[in-house]
C-alpha cells in the first residue's frame, strides 16, 4: 500500500506516467467510467476547500466509485477532540482511499502512518499540496508541450504558499528551469526551500519585488493570493493583500505564448479583465485537477481499465 504526502514520494518517471494517464482519460473518458466501481473515497477536509474537494469527489464519481466524508472540522468528531490518528482509523473502516486536508503541517503524514488504506495529502498548512502540483504540471505540459527549458515566475505569497513550495520542489528535477521569485520582502520564499531545493539543485533564480520588470521574460506566471488565514495579524494582511494585481494592461509587456496559472481561489490579484485573455489558463488548470486526481486514485488503488474490463 502506498500514500502520497509529498510530491517527492513520486519519481519523475512516475509523475510523467500519471500525466500520460491523465491525458488518456481526457481523450477517452468512457474507457475509465467504471474502473473504481464498488470503491469508496473518504474526503477528510479539516480546512475549507472548493476546488480540491470537489475535484477529488468528481474524480471518484467519474471513475464509477462513491464518496463519503466531511468538509469542515466542525462537522467531524475533531470538534469533540478526536485525534487525526483516530479519525483516520475510523475512516479506514468505511473507505478504500482517503484524501485529507488539514491546517496543521504533517497531519496527513501522521494519518498515513496509522492508515490501512492509501492517504493522499490534499494540503497541509503551508507545507505541501502534491495533487495541486500534479495539476500544475499537467496544465503546463498540455499548454507548453514540455516540462523543461522554460522560465516560471511565482508571484505573491511565497512564504505560506504550499502550492508554490510543492511546484518548485517538483520542477527542480527537470532540466533548464529558471525561477523568478516575485514577492514583498515579508512574503519571500522560505530560506530552507531556497537553499535545499533551488540552490542545491543548481537552479538559476532571480528574486525581485517588481512584477512588471520581469514579466516580459516569463513563459509561465504562477499567481497566488495573499492568504488571510495564515496571518497572525489582520493589520499585516491588509497591508500586504494588494501587493500585486495582474491586469490586462500589464500583460501588454508579456509574451504572446505566456500561460497564467493560479491555484485559486483568487481574491483580486488577477483582475477579471484578464479572464478573456487566451493566456489565462487558471480555469482550465482547475479542470486538469480532476483528471490528474483520477489517474492518481487509480494508481494508488492499483486499478486499471484493462483489468476491470477483463473481470
Image (cartoon, helix red, strand yellow):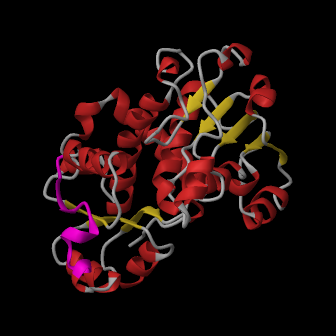
Magenta highlight range: 64-79
Task: Using the image as rendered, state which of residue 202 and residue 65 is in the foreground.
Answer: 202
Q: Which quarter of the figure has residue 42?
A: bottom left
Q: Quadrant of the N terminus?
A: bottom left
The magenta stretch spans residue 206 = no
| Horizontal and vertical percent position of residue 301 | 32, 61
Q: How many discs appear?
A: 0
| Horizontal and vertical percent position of residue 90 | 21, 81
Q: Tell me if residue 161 can be seen.
A: no
Task: Using the image as rendered, state which of residue 278 and residue 57 is in the foreground.
Answer: 278
| Horizontal and vertical percent position of residue 222 | 61, 38
Q: Tell me if residue 81 can be seen.
A: yes
| In-image side of 16 versus 211 (left or right) | left
| In-image side of 71 versus 220 (left or right) | left
The magenta stretch spans residue 78 = yes
Task: Using the image as rendered, state which of residue 292 and residue 27 is in the foreground.
Answer: 292
Residue shown at the point (20%, 40%) measured from the top left = 33
Residue shown at the point (52%, 25%) measured from the top left = 271
Position of 5 relative to 134 (above/below): below
| Horizontal and vertical percent position of residue 159 | 65, 58
| In-image side of 297 versus 62 (left or right) | right
Q: Which residue is situated farthest in the front direction here?
A: 235
Residue shown at the point (21%, 52%) measured from the top left = 36
Amino acid at each position: 500500500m502506498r500514500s502520497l504526502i509529498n510530491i517527492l514520494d513520486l519519481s519523475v518517471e512516475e509523475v510523467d506516467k500519471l500525466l500520460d494517464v491523465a491525458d488518456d482519460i481526457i481523450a477517452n473518458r468512457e474507457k475509465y467510467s467504471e474502473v473504481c466501481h464498488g470503491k469508496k473515497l473518504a474526503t477528510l477536509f479539516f480546512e475549507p476547500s472548493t476546488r480540491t474537494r470537489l475535484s477529488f469527489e468528481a474524480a471518484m464519481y467519474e471513475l464509477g466509485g462513491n464518496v463519503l466524508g466531511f468538509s469542515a472540522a466542525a462537522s467531524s468528531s475533531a470538534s469533540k477532540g478526536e485525534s487525526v490518528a483516530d479519525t483516520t482509523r475510523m475512516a479506514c473502516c468505511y473507505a478504500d482511499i482517503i484524501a485529507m486536508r488539514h491546517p496543521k503541517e504533517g497531519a496527513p503524514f501522521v494519518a498515513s502512518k496509522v492508515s490501512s488504506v492509501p492517504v493522499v495529502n490534499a494540503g497541509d498548512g503551508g507545507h505541501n499540496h502534491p495533487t495541486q502540483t500534479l495539476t500544475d504540471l499537467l496544465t503546463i505540459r498540455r499548454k507548453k508541450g514540455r516540462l523543461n527549458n522554460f522560465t516560471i515566475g511565482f508571484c505573491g505569497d511565497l512564504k505560506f504558499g504550499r502550492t508554490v513550495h510543492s511546484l518548485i520542489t517538483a520542477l527542480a528535477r527537470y532540466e533548464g528551469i529558471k525561477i523568478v521569485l516575485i514577492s514583498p520582502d515579508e512574503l519571500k520564499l522560505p530560506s530552507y526551500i531556497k537553499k535545499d531545493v533551488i540552490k542545491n539543485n543548481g537552479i538559476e533564480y532571480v528574486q525581485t519585488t517588481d512584477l512588471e520588470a520581469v514579466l516580459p521574460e516569463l513563459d509561465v506566471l504562477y499567481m497566488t493570493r495573499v492568504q488571510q488565514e495564515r496571518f497572525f495579524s489582520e493589520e499585516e494582511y491588509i497591508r500586504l493583500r494588494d501587493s500585486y494585481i495582474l491586469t490586462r494592461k500589464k500583460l501588454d509587456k508579456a509574451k504572446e505564448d505566456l500561460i497564467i496559472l493560479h491555484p485559486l481561489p483568487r481574491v483580486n490579484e488577477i483582475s477579471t479583465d484578464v479572464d478573456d485573455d487566451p493566456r489565462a489558463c487558471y480555469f482550465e488548470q482547475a479542470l486538469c485537477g480532476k483528471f490528474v486526481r483520477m489517474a492518481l486514485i487509480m494508481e494508488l488503488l492499483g486499478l486499471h481499465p484493462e483489468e476491470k474490463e477483463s473481470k
